[in-house]
Image (cartoon, grey):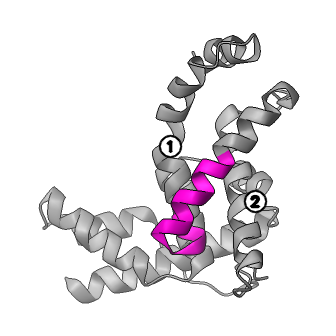
Amino acid sequence: MINHYLSKVIKGDVSAYSYIVDQYKNMAFSIAYRVVNNREDAEEITQDAFLKAYNSLKRFNHKSKFSTWLYKIVYNTAISKIRENKKKSVVNQLIDKDIENINIEDIDNVLVKFDEEHQKKIINSAIDKLSENEKLIITFYYLAEKSINEITEITNFSSSNVKVILHRARKKMYEELRIRN
């Protein structure tokens, strides 16, 4: 479906790009926001990223999913914004071999007793307590439903680094949610 709209845009139908933007704007904003932690910057980054994607669309080679390609543009635009604002870099090398295994099921078990709306508030509160990298990886993995390989491609983190960050984030969320239980 998305390839149909991509072809239309490449052939000159600029209005078809609005469909693409509508499909990906929320996740693009979420990714930008998780990186810069500032609503106005995230909005600007999202707009810039869609413009960059539009201008580069003819170079999209379909080796990866369009969403992966787009989210990499969003991520790189956000990182550039951080550098531009002279904020600290969000790229850390995290290596920790002895991490307790916490699965998403453990988190689900803690959340079972809350209604869905309350669960969302609790989860967002727990996510807000994570480091910037952890927020980003959780967003890519669970909200954007990206694989470890796709996250690696988007962020240029090593696969093991993504797994460690994801694992630490799960553990911290589990601890935070368990406290609320």
At mark 2, the secondary structure is helix
Q: What residue would you read off at disc 2? A: 76
Q: CA distance from mark 2 to mark 1?
A: 16 Å
Q: Mark 1: give few (<14), some (14-19) or many (20+) Cα within 10 Å.
A: some
> Where, quadrant-wise, is the N terminus in this rendering?
top right
| Image x and y of residue 125, in percent | 32, 77
- Residue 23 placement, left or right of 157: left
Look at label 2 and name its amino acid.
Asn
Q: How many marks?
A: 2
Q: Earlier in the sequence, mark 2 or mark 1?
A: 1
The magenta segment is 33-49
Residue 3 belongs to magenta span: no
From what the image shows, is residue 29 above or below residue 112?
above
In the rendered image, residue 75, in percent from the top left (x then y), is placed at 69, 59
Task: Judge from the rendering whether residue 110 lies leftward or rightward of residue 115; answer left or right.
Answer: right
In the displayed structure image, the side of residue 17 where residue 77 appears, left or right: right
Q: Residue at x 47, y 52 (%)?
A: 143
Residue to which mark 1 is pinned: 25
136 over 50 or under it: above or below: below
Q: Amino acid at mark 1?
A: Lys
Where does residue 5 sit, x and y in percent of width and height? 62, 16
